[in-house]
Image (cartoon, rainbow, N blue to C red):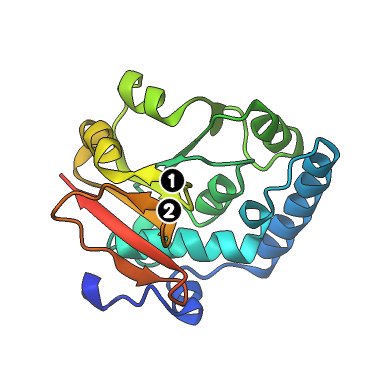
Amino acid sequence: MAMRSLDLNSLESLYRYFPTRLRERARWRELAQQAATLLAEQGHYGLPALLPSFVHARVAAALAASGLIGRRSLQSMAILTLGAHAGLEVRILQDLGAGTVLGVERDPRLVAVGHQLGLADPASLVVGDSWEFLSENRSVWDRILVLAPQRLALTPLWDQARSRLTPTGCLVVLAHRGEASDAPPQANPRPALEDTMLAWVFRR
């Protein structure tokens, strides 16, 4: 299937591109509910990042936008996800079969809850500023994902991310309309998730 023909808008299509197992979805719901409860006790209400069906759809849209389809396509992939919250998207990527996944989240409370509940282990979810991580960490990635950011400037992000990609890698930003700005001239976003978000793909 050609990359541009992949439907990023239909939730039905996205779930079909990256199908999941019943026990995986049940475990995601269980862990996400526990995380939401713990975080609410601390005054943190990041509900969308803890809704498994939403996060699964976002992950699937980002992967499909980058040209991947199916669990097998992820087996050799090294994926970095920035702004990973409590690690649900890390867990979903791992369960889908990604070879290596690392999530970076600046809020230590979110990371602590993710570790406590087993959403992601300490090697897969770390505390850090995304900009500093891209600047200082020397690892390279097949995919760098930024899912549902707030007030993100795209050109500075791409300037930081491009050197952290493999020769065939790409940066994928999936943002609600109005939450991403300063796009490079070559940017050509596509509508995604029932027209509620836009997907940008930047390649080396």
Alpha carbon separation for disc pair 1 and 2: 5 Å
Residue 134, image x and y in percent? 34, 28
Residue 159, image x and y in percent? 22, 34
Is any atom of residue 196 visible in this view?
Answer: yes
Give the answer, above or below, for where 202 lies relative to 129.
Answer: below
For this view, does 28 lie left or right of residue 7? right
Give the answer, above or below, for where 134 lies relative to 101.
Answer: above
* Residue in the image at 43% along x and 75% along y: 195
Q: Residue under circle 1?
A: 151
Q: Residue under circle 2?
A: 179
Is any atom of residue 78 visible in this view?
Answer: no
Q: Earlier in the sequence, mark 1 or mark 2?
A: 1
The part of the image, by quadrant, that contains residue 125 is top right
Image quadrant in which the C terminus is located? top left
Tell me the crowding category of disc 2: few under 14, some 14 to 19, or many 20 or more residues within 10 angstroms, Cα based. Answer: some
The part of the image, by quadrant, that contains residue 81 is top left
Judge by depth and name the residue closer to the eye, 67 or 200: 200
Residue type for callout 1: Arg
Q: Which mark is residue 164?
A: none
